[in-house]
Amino acid sequence: MKATRSTVLSMRLSKHSGQRLKRMAKRHGWTPSDASARLVEEGLRRSEFAFLDFRDSAAGRQAYLQGSTLAVWEIMLLVRSYKGNVAAVAKHLRWPEAKVRAAVNYAEVFPEEIAEAMSDNDAADFQTLKRMLPQATEFVSRKRTRS
């Protein structure tokens, strides 16, 4: 999430919430101010888009569809492979069409975010994946010869 212009707002948090915010900020390498701004932005997006959630991933915090393991950009890869056919993607995922449409709606409003994630995915090779997921093994298909 990139901010172009900002406004300064003051807020009060309980001591416990402030400590939790500072821990989260430290974990991500953010300032507490950055962390609170991100959380507010994520909360606003959750309230504006159906089925949306945000999670930490190996690639950073990303928008996901609730009740799934798929990030919005991953759903958009499917939408692209199905040439924009939302109904076909919904059938493929065995989801209601509205859930796929929610991902499309989000991607339409935040195209740079989704394009960047898709570009990062397109640029990743197996060695990049193995650094993020050390347990990954490369699948090589072998034809069996009949004797």
Image: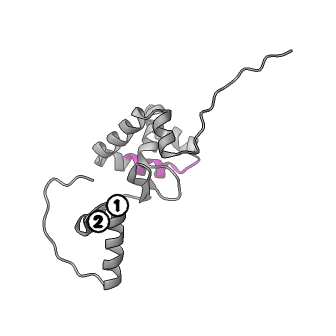
Q: What type is the residue that disc 1 sits on? A: His
Of residues 144 and 96, which is closer to you in this image? Answer: 144
Residue with the mark numbered 1: 28
Q: What type is the residue that disc 2 sits on? A: Ala
Of residues 76 and 119, which is closer to you in this image? Answer: 119
Q: Quadrant of the C terminus?
A: top right
Say what secondary structure mark 1 lies in.
Answer: helix
Q: Position of residue 40 (x, y in %)?
A: 28, 67
Query: Which residue is outermost to the bottom?
Result: 15
Q: Which mark is residue 35?
A: 2
Q: Position of residue 2 (x, y in %)?
A: 23, 52
Which portion, as a residue range, is magenta? 94-104
Q: Which mark is residue 54?
A: none
Q: Is residue 102 magenta?
A: yes
Q: Are marks 1 and 2 in contact (CB under 8 Å)?
A: yes
Identified at 32% across, 41% down, the residue is: 116
